[in-house]
Amino acid sequence: MSSTHPAWTHRLGQKHPPQRHEGLLDSIGNTPLVRLNRVTQGLSDGVEVWAKMESMNPGGSVKDRPARQIFVDALDSGDLGDDQTLIDATSGNTGIAYAMIGAFLGIDVELVMPSNVSPQRKEIVRIYGATITFSDPMEGSDGAIRLVRQIVEDDDEGRYFYADQYRNPSNVRAHQMTTAPEIWGQTGGKITHFVTSTGTSGTVMGTGRGLKERNDDIQVVGAQPSDSFHGLEGLKHMPSSIKPEIYREEELDDICWIDTDEAWDMADALAQKEGIACGYSSGANVVAALEVARELEQGLVVTVICDHADRYVGE
């Protein structure tokens, strides 16, 4: 069998002009939007499902966007002062983004993470020079949130700037300002549904608001694990979790409930059928997007590939 599918050979000579940036922060965003072709078999002819490839950000995940906005807004406002350390709770990807951007800006970063996050995430954070405090693995992301709040409460010297991604409006603003207009432009304004899972909820809240500013008829669907004891790192089962203050369920048009096994299986299918090696939250996103798409006769559904599988390999 030929290594190149005949339908694509005519496109291989097309080139896009390479971009040049003055610094790392400018390289965040403007990620590709890729149509899913094989995992979508069986959908109506008038329905398309596309994936925003956030794994192609410089830090490898969608979390580069809110992390950049949190740094920029805190520096502009003076909330993050000289000699302060940025601290936050994270299940991994936001921590990597903080560590990367902190290294670029020369700002110290300290992270509170459940001790059972993947070894790859721990090592990437350390490579950038950030320090880690581990929370109880049995308490998940909520345990990390409780511990970081205690650390900040005990900080009598003003050592820390608490980024607080679960409360920080910069998390939402990042996607409202960047992800939404990118998707709108990449689809030529034809998007009908935006579907993604909820962890901090910044992606679905911000992108949803930005898209509805352009067309209020666009349906925004949040996906959640169907059970409180799930295996989808970074995602929240909202009924049993500490709800992020930036989460506004009333702004969602619908919610999809995703089983862990379905999401894991879809992550494998995306690698083997689409050539997209991604994490399990991305698998959950595509499961939810397909659930929405199966109910449509016409529509353009967009979801998110949150990160790359390389930070899960060996789990």
Image: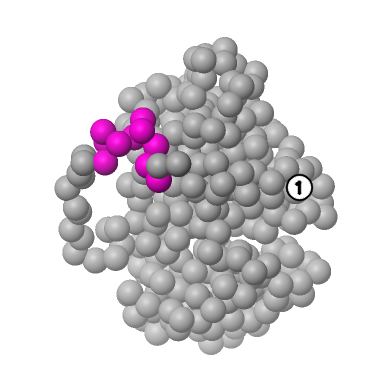
Amino acid marked by disc 1: Asp
Residue 275 at x, y percent in the picture: 49, 47
Indicate the secondary structure of the residue bearing disc 1.
helix
As displayed, is residue 83 above or below residue 25?
below
Q: Tell me which corner region of the image, top left, top right, bottom left or bottom right, holds residue 3.
A: top left
As displayed, is residue 110 above or below residue 55?
below
**Which of the pair 82/202 is nearer the observer?**
202
As displayed, is residue 201 above or below residue 102?
above
**Which of the pair 121/234 is nearer the observer?**
121
Q: Horizontally, is 240 left or right of 221 in the view? A: right
Residue 110 at x, y percent in the picture: 53, 79
**Which of the pair 154/14 is nearer the observer?**
14
- 11 within the magenta span: yes
- 44 within the magenta span: no
For image coordinates 33% across by 75% down, the residue present is 105
For image coordinates 54% across by 79% down, the residue present is 123
For image coordinates 19% across by 52% down, the residue present is 18
In the image, farthest residue toward the bottom? 157
Residue at the disc numbered 1: 261
Residue 92 at x, y percent in the picture: 58, 66
- Which residues, given as a range, are shown in magenta? 3-12
For image coordinates 49% across by 34% down, the residue present is 36
